């Protein structure tokens, strides 16, 4: 019983179902990223959980495409999305053991809570952050 969180399966998918996946184990709480790239990728800030790459199992990846901007200051970061419906799904720095997964792609209930905000220095001017969660000008400092 004590290890149930290690065996927990969380499912996720894009809007049309051409990309579906499962993640095993406990997920990090949701971090809202306010960087300019997330705004372009999501249409607003990006809300992400995170899990070790080897804990993600693709169950349907027909529409999965990866984008890497060669002119970006983060050239090692790949962004995964569905080429059919356009859902933004993943943010993965390829040299890191963790992959960020868009919270909106998760099948509910997730039981996850938002734990903070990153890249607040790049936050858009059309909304305010009104909660009392930690805010960082750049990346999360753990």
Image: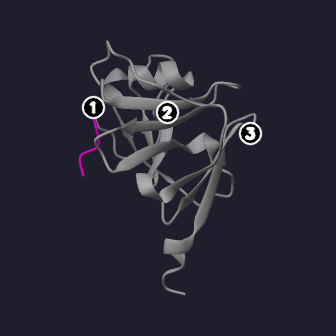
- Residue 72 % position (x, y): 32, 17
Closer to the camera: disc 2 or disc 1? 2
Judged from this view, the residue extending furthest toward the top is 71
**Residue 42 position within the rendered picture, expressed as x and y whole percent measured from the top left:** 55, 26
Say which residue label 2 marks: 46
Q: Earlier in the sequence, mark 2 or mark 3?
A: 3
Residue 98 lies, with reference to residue 66, above or below; the image says: below
- Mark 3, residue position: 17
* Quarter occupied by the N terminus: bottom right
Query: Residue at position x 63%, y 42% from top?
Result: 105
Q: What is the residue that sits farthest to the right in this orientation? A: 16
Q: Is residue 75 above or below residue 114?
A: above
Q: Quadrant of residue 121?
A: top left
Residue found at the far left of this picture: 141
| Residue at point 56%, 54% (across, down) | 57
**SS class, disc 1:** loop
Q: Taken as a whole, is the magenta stretch helix, strand or loop?
A: loop
Is residue 50 magenta-colored? Answer: no
Residues in magenta, as a range: 137-142
């Amino acid at each position: 019983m004590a290890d149930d969180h290690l065996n927990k399966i969380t499912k996720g998918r894009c809007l049309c179902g051409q990309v579906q996946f499962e993640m095993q184990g406990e997920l990090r709480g949701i971090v809202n990223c306010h960087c300019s790239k997330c705004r372009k990728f999501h249409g607003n800030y990006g809300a992400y959980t995170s899990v070790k790459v080897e804990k993600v199992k693709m169950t349907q990846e027909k529409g999965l495409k990866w984008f890497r901007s060669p002119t970006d200051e983060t050239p090692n970061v790949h962004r995964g999305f569905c080429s059919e419906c356009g859902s933004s799904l993943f943010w993965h720095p390829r040299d890191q053991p963790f992959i960020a997964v868009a919270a909106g792609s998760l099948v509910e209930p997730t039981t996850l809570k938002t734990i903070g905000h990153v890249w607040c220095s790049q936050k858009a001017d059309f909304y305010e952050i009104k909660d009392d969660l930690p805010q960082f000008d750049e990346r999360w400092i753990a």
